[in-house]
Image: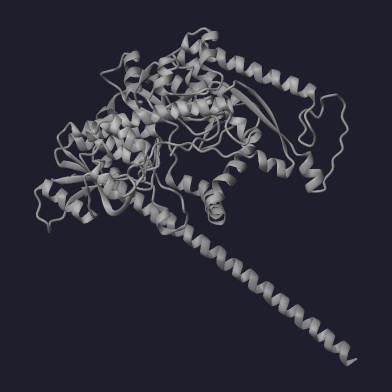
Amino acid sequence: MKQIKLKQKSLILAQQIFKNMKFLGNVLAVIVGLLIFSVISFFFFAGLIAVISSSEEEVKIKENTVLVLNLEGRVLAERSNEDDPDFSSFGLISTVPSIGLTSLKNAIRTAKENDNIKGIFLKAGTLMAGQAGIKELRDELLSFKESGKFIISYGELYTENGYYLSTAADEIYVNPSGMMEFNGLASEILFFKGLFQKLEVEPEIFRVGDFKSAVEPFMLDKMSEENRLQTESFLTDLNAFMLNEISESRGINYNRLKEINAQMLVRRMKDAEELKLIDGLWYEDQVIDLMKQKLGLEKEDKINTINVSRINKAVKPKSRSSKNRIAVIVAEGEIMGGNADNLISSERFKEEIRKARKNDNVKAIVLRVNSPGGSALASEVIWRELEEARKEKPVIASMGEVAASGGYYIAAASDTIVAQPNTITGSIGIFALWFNAKGLLNNKLGITTDVVKTGEFSDFLSPTRRVTDAEKEIFQKQIEDGYDIFLSRVAQGREMDKEDVMKVASGRVWTGNQALENGLVDVLGGLDEAIKIAATKAGVADDYRVVYYPEMKSWFERFISQISNDVQAYYQQKKLGNFYPIYKQIEDLHKYEGIMVRMPFDYHIQ
């Protein structure tokens, strides 16, 4: 009896402990929830106060001021909201801050025209951007120098692209213990054939075009000869263009610069100084003293500085009062169906284009494309809406970093296509990807399936078995029909014979220079050139204002919608480290639904 009572008491005690633990767990959960809510509330109100105070504050540019362009570690985007609070500095979410190309260009122009601005202090060694974006920003800096004002660049680390931009400066200085990358361009591609073999997953590939290599990572373990040819071709052209511009800015013979670059002759920072790639190995305080001398200040004096957001608030655009509008529709990201943010979703952009078309004050449309492509169906939906707009007013395409595959598809609806010499474009081809997971399910997971169907093709392209020859024939025909439509859209827009389009299509990627030679591009230039062409065609070249579509959401709307994704991405990056890019590429496979017009994978040129 004693033993039974002891057991009962022990059971009661255990239950009590369990209840207490459960209670403590609930308390802990409440505390954590309150903590998270408090943190979010803090950032909300801090950001709200910052935005309100900054919007009410009148910004005046003092005499003898230097514009500071601190682009270190930032991603160059088409647009960014200058009033966004920087949450990353508080350590809540570890997102890479972006900065808008449009905002930067406006700031540099204001600095050029304002007599109180005497120069620019550029810190852009680790700016993350493609070469076409850098070209556009670099041209703006070169235009600034025409005013006779100085640009001084300083950094502790210079990537190849960061150095390319910084060569627009009069003088470049690097920390004596810094580093510099100047060894040519490379594009490395991940291949997953071995992974799928281990998982017993069989990719089913459908494509048209010898150069349409977006599916190669799933069927090969290295580049095809066709893909290697096109990659070498456009990388060589990009590198030669960059070296030519650096040669002009630094006054170094092109052939000598090419040798320095190809053989990576900059292996110590002293090499960069001796080879005249930089002007000195200085610390930042020494560079600041140099600027004080240029400003006529004493060493103990403080330099008046202003940043991008403040200088843009100080001066309002002169054309703001005009009723004539040029609508710039910014199409940045992958092309997909639906109505999602942060990509080119067909329903959303169809409405934006229609809104600009029906607005009588909008005299012309400029489609700013920065996209590797995506869904063929979504591209066709957007193309159709642009084609309708083209019947009523001029439509001009401006290509940014990348305007390929679906990005080129939608650009083909325009009257004129403008691209930078180092824009990545073309890739006129089509593919589809399907996976047979029967081996993974049966042999790895022990899962089997069975099916009842009313027709021969009722389970068409089932992922639990191999695709039959009949199914392959049907789907391949659909792919070929889609390719024929793509060719027709390009031929119609470019006023070319379909046979001539086929010679430069087949999924091949071109630079803007090469695309101009092949008739795929009309004019070399940036967004400003495209806007001028649009205004001229619309007959409003002397009186117009620029408006941007889609309208940017407030920082808080984007903060709430993105915080979950940002935290998840941050967690995955911390957990996977250097393997995160591989995980991300595999995770993105779910986007490849239906027939795709997309770039040959994501090029990371370094």
The quadrant of the rendering that contains the C terminus is top left
Dividing the picture into quadrants, the one containing residue 530 is top left
Report the front residue among 37 and 474: 474
How far across and how far down the image is residue 372, in percent?
51, 30
Residue located farthest toward the right when viewing the structure as drawn: 1
Report the front residue among 425 and 117: 425
Residue 361 left/right relative to 557: left
How far across and how far down the image is residue 41, in percent?
46, 58
How far across and how far down the image is residue 2, in percent?
87, 92
Report the front residue among 370 and 281: 281
**Residue at 52% from the left image edge and 53% from the top image edge:** 570
Dividing the picture into quadrants, the one containing residue 142 is top left
Asked whether residue 450 appears in the rendered view, the answer is yes
Residue 7 left/right relative to 374: right
Question: Where is 554 relative to 386, above or below?
Answer: below
The quadrant of the rendering that contains the N terminus is bottom right
Asked whether residue 317 appears in the rendered view, the answer is no
Question: Where is 195 relative to 480, above or below?
Answer: below
Dividing the picture into quadrants, the one containing residue 575 is bottom right
Residue located farthest toward the top when viewing the structure as drawn: 497
Q: How did the renderer colour the structure?
A: one colour
**Residue at 79% from the left image edge and 44% from the top image edge:** 441
